[in-house]
Image (spheres, rainbow, N blue to C red):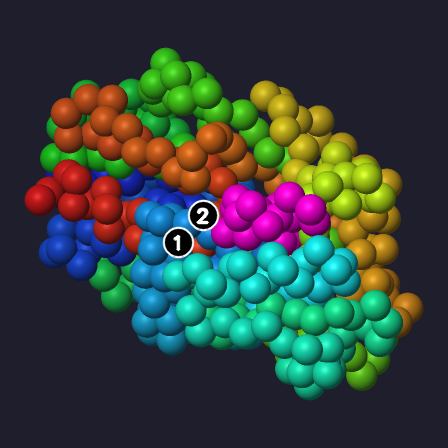
């Protein structure tokens, strides 16, 4: 006999799991269907860095605030360790300082501070000794280890909330209440499709109309010299020139112009430094951004070298050793997320800005309100 659910979620990345959580909190029965045996895409190929202050002003910034609170609530229940809190952006360009002040004057700057070089080194003793002009400090961010956090979140949803997972199962078509899969029929009253960067699976004509492309990123795991400790996630001020929360301010243009003039390889490869610490003392470091309909799967040694040069200029990691390298892809578009209704009782939801870890929980609550309220 075919089991019938209130909601079927297609996709078991962070966005799909967030929708499962939002649904069970409404008392709904949920099945999550995914073609892979375990999480394997963008949801585990990232920093696990839940960022608030860098998000685009307005709705997406508010989504990050809400998602950060859900992470803080869910993590201890699911056995997920919060490894770091807060963030620091090290300023090494004069043009970054007025941009930091401009950001602090916006609503997004609440709770953040502009630190002097000495204050920044007190907050993060691992900063490189030379070239530091100041820093933007935020208390809001959280850092989890994505590779373990996503499986733990799924296991908690299954164990404590009765979510049913159908893995290694592809969805071929949706005609509610029937969902045709490679493992037989599933029945559900509603369906949410979270396809990641699969543009040709379900509802390809709707996805095509969104004008999306793919973003390829490169990341590294680095082991610094013994004794190095990273107290909180650190970024360089290349981030101020790139992330919407800062880069969309008028005061960002002088910094962007200087970087384009003096360091053109960095914006050409979409590089800005983020470094976060893992429990074993290694650092997850990145990243880059190259856009194409089908990005080449080959990592560039030149891009890795640029990332590592920025790491050495920002943090006193010494003779750091790369112990792991990987690439990832995600959907990218003009808006940070999309929610479409391809048919009645079905929603197609995609994060199109690389901010899934930071905003998915709030996006899922919006989707549930759209479907059920």
Task: State the image quarter where residue 21 is shown.
Answer: bottom left
Vertical side of 19 occupied by 296: above or below:
above
- Residue depicted at x 19% and y 55%: 24
Q: CA distance from mark 2 to mark 1?
A: 6 Å
Decide whether the magenta segment is chiefly helix, strand or loop.
Answer: helix
Q: Quadrant of the C terminus?
A: top left
Q: Nearer the viewer, residue 23 or 339?
A: 339
Vertical side of 179 occupied by 23: above or below:
below
Vertical side of 257 occupied by 26: above or below:
below
- Point out the stretch of residues depicted in magenta: 239-255
Q: Nearer the viewer, residue 336 or 242?
A: 242
* Left or right of residue 233: residue 149: left
Does residue 349 belong to the magenta stretch?
no
Q: Which residue is mark 1?
A: 61
- Residue depicted at x 28% and y 28%: 340
Determine whether label 2 and label 1 are within 8 Å by CB.
yes
Q: Earlier in the sequence, mark 2 or mark 1?
A: 2
Q: In terms of secondary structure, where does tag 2 sit?
A: loop
Label 1 crowding class (10 Å Cα cut-off): few <14, some 14-19, many 20+? many
Q: Quadrant of the N terminus?
A: top left
Task: State the image quarter where residue 152 is shown.
Answer: bottom left
Q: Which mark is residue 300?
A: none
Label 2 crowding class (10 Å Cα cut-off): few <14, some 14-19, many 20+? many
- Residue depicted at x 60% and y 57%: 99
The answer to whether residue 142 is seen in the rendering is: no
Q: Which mark is residue 56?
A: 2
């Amino acid at each position: 006999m075919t089991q019938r659910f209130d909601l079927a979620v297609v996709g078991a990345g962070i966005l799909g799991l967030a929708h499962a959580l939002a649904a069970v909190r409404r008392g709904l029965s949920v099945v999550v269907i995914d073609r892979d045996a375990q999480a394997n895409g963008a949801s585990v190929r990232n920093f696990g860095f839940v960022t608030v202050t860098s998000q685009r002003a307005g709705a997406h910034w508010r989504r990050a605030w809400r998602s950060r609170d859900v992470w803080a609530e869910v993590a201890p229940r699911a056995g997920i360790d919060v490894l770091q809190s807060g963030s620091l952006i090290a300023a090494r360009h004069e043009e970054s300082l007025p941009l930091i002040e401009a950001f602090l004057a916006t609503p997004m700057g609440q709770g953040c501070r502009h630190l002097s070089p000495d204050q920044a080194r007190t907050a993060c003793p691992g900063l490189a000794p030379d070239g530091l002009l100041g820093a933007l400090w935020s208390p809001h961010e959280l850092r989890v280890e994505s590779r373990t956090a996503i499986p733990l979140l799924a296991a908690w949803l299954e164990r404590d909330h009765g979510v049913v997972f159908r893995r290694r199962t592809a969805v071929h078509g949706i005609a509610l209440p029937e969902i045709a899969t490679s493992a037989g029929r599933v029945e559900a009253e509603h369906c949410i499709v979270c396809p990641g960067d699969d543009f040709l699976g379900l509802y390809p004509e709707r996805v095509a109309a969104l004008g999306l492309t793919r973003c390829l990123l490169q990341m590294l795991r680095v082991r610094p010299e013994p004794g190095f400790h990273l107290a909180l996630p650190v970024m360089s001020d290349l981030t101020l020139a790139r992330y919407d929360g800062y880069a969309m301010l008028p005061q960002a243009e002088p910094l962007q112009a200087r970087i384009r003039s003096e360091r053109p390889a960095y914006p050409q490869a979409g590089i800005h430094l983020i470094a976060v610490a893992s429990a074993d003392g290694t650092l997850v470091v990145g990243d880059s951004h190259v856009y194409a309909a089908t990005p080449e799967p080959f990592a560039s040694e030149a891009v890795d070298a640029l990332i590592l040069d920025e790491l050495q200029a920002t943090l006193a990691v010494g003779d750091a050793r790369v112990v792991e390298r990987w690439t990832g892809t995600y959907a990218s578009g003009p808006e940070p997320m999309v929610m479409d209704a391809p048919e009645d009782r079905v929603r197609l939801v995609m994060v199109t800005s690389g901010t899934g870890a930071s905003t998915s929980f709030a996006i899922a609550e919006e989707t549930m309100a759209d479907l059920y309220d």
